[in-house]
């Protein structure tokens, strides 16, 4: 069942750009988006492989593999956000970023930095095995939520 779910999710990501009203903008960073799909699929394969190994008796700690895998994915998300243009499916899509190209750009520059920093912090979690998951979750939450809040204040500031 797991490979089917992963494949359906990947196919959805491939289909999304075709229905985006701002698909011209998405096409400007399509190579980065396609790279994200490949990294995400590799991440899914890692999870599936680890599940299979675990069931065969080879227990590899998720506190070791997940921080490394998430760090790679988070760093790449940072790269992709840096290159992204306004669209309806990829990025920090708030009412404020979708209402202003300037707010979109400012928010995504900040988010790109935060996701790259979160990747490094997540990777450090490897050295703190019992807390690795909590370090990873905290870094990801901050990197994902702070830009949403920032986008509101950037929009308000722009429209004063």
Image (cartoon, rainbow, N blue to C red):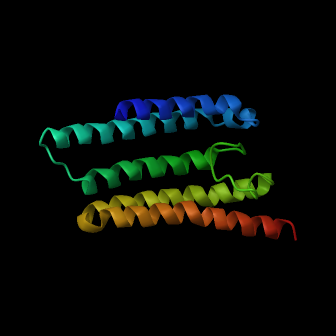
Q: Quadrant of residue 28?
A: top right
Rendered view: 19 above or below 100: above
Furthest toward the right, the residue is 160
For the C terminus, the quadrant is bottom right
- Which residue corresponds to the image point at 14% horizontal and 38% vertical from the top-left? 56
* 101 with respect to 3 (left or right): right
* Up/down of 24 relative to 153, above or below: above
- Image spot of residue 47 (x, y percent): 32, 42
> Which of these two is toward me, 139 or 94?
94
The picture quadrant where one finds residue 89 is top right
Residue in front for this viewpoint, 96 or 4: 4
At 67% from the left and 59% from the top, the residue drawn is 107
- Across and down, in percent, residue 99 comes to 80, 54
Outermost residue on the front side: it is: 1
107 to 85, vertically: above or below = below
Q: Quadrant of the N terminus?
A: top left
Q: Quick one: 137 or 6, which is closer to the camera? A: 6
- x%, y% of residue 34? 54, 32
At 59% from the left and 66% from the top, the residue drawn is 146
In this rendering, the count of numbered labels is 0
Image spot of residue 20 (x, y percent): 71, 35
């Amino acid at each position: 069942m797991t490979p089917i779910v992963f494949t359906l999710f990947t196919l959805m990501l491939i289909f999304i750009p075709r229905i985006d009203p701002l698909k011209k903008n998405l096409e400007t960073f399509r190579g980065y988006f396609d790279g994200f799909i490949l990294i995400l699929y590799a991440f899914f394969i890692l999870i599936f492989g680890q599940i299979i190994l675990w069931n065969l008796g080879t227990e590899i700690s998720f506190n070791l593999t997940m921080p490394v895998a998430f760090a790679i994915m988070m760093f790449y998300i940072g790269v992709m956000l840096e290159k992204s243009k306004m669209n309806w499916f990829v990025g920090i899509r708030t009412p404020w970023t979708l209402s202003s190209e300037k707010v979109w750009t400012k928010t995504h520059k900040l988010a790109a930095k935060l996701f790259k920093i979160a990747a490094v912090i997540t990777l450090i979690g490897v050295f703190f095995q019992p807390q690795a998951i909590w370090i990873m979750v905290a870094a990801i939450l901050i990197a994902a939520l702070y830009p949403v809040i920032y986008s509101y204040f950037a929009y308000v500031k722009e429209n004063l």
